[in-house]
Amino acid sequence: MSGFSTLFRKEILRFWKVVYQTVAGPVISTVLYLLVFSNALQGRVEAFPGIGYTAFLVPGLVMMAMQQNAFANASSSLVQSKVTGNIVFVLLPPLSVRDLFAAYVGAAVVRGLAVGLGVFAITLFFAMPPFPAPLWALLFGLLGCAILGTMGLIAGIWAEKFDQMAAVQSFVIGPATFLAGVFYSVHSLPPFWQAISHLNPFFYLVDGFRYGFIGQSDVPPLVSLAIVCATLAAVSSVALWMLKTGYKLRH
């Protein structure tokens, strides 16, 4: 446990020392989305009966911020270590694969939750969600941060320089997050695009998380939970295999 706790603490301190960049910045940029979209569409769009657009938008934005920052934390840490050459100080100590995995993903979860709580605290000034199922929101929030933290770990192991990591963020994570129903209900889309959206695992994270806030969702929350858990198991298996084999780390 000492190896895990040391690396976990190091990863927490790494992003906390630049908290204005890693936490405050994402909070402010996400709140700007709320200001623009809520002012433009409040009263004009009703995604679910009896739910205002701002109340609908808030959980989507919170989840989006958590996802993007959990991914960024793990991926940037590994790529930075590889570029500067200090990855050797992580690989030389007798840390198990599980220690490495838990420390990187755990720190990503902490950063994702910190950003999510910051966004949520500010959005309370705009809309107070009814919160009929807070435990569902907490569960999907933790799973979402864990999935994106694990995906960030995979991307960080694969990438050899910052532009490769940025490409994954720009062409995979960003589009998948924005097209997950953050700003709209999937039921409002044509059938073809509904089918495409249901292939996106990020959609089930947003939809299940939103259910905890407003008690309504496009998909039953148990279905979303099953798909999210399967996604976490899949990406965790890939990340653990990469760490165990030393893929692009020890060769």
Image (tube, grey):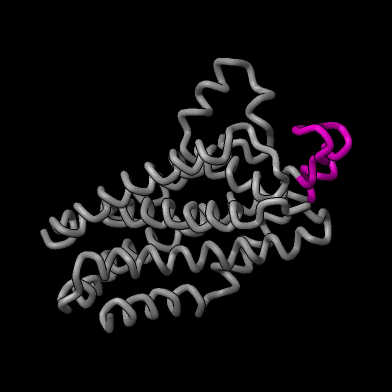
Residue at image coords 38%, 43%: 231
Region in magenta: 35-55
Where is residue 172? Give x, y as percent: 43, 40
Quadrant location of the N terminus in the rendered image: bottom left
Towards the viewer: 173 or 114: 114
Q: Is residue 238 magenta?
A: no
Q: Is residue 182 left or right of residue 111?
A: right
Q: Disc count in the image? A: 0
Where is residue 16? Give x, y as percent: 51, 77
Q: Is residue 66 left or right of residue 229?
A: right
Residue at image coords 38%, 48%: 232
Where is residue 153? Give x, y as percent: 33, 57
Q: Is residue 250 left or right of residue 29?
A: left
142 shown above or below 6: above
Q: Quadrant of residue 206?
A: top right
185 shown above or below 237: above
Q: Is residue 51 magenta?
A: yes
Towards the viewer: 68 or 239: 239
14 shown above or below 154: below
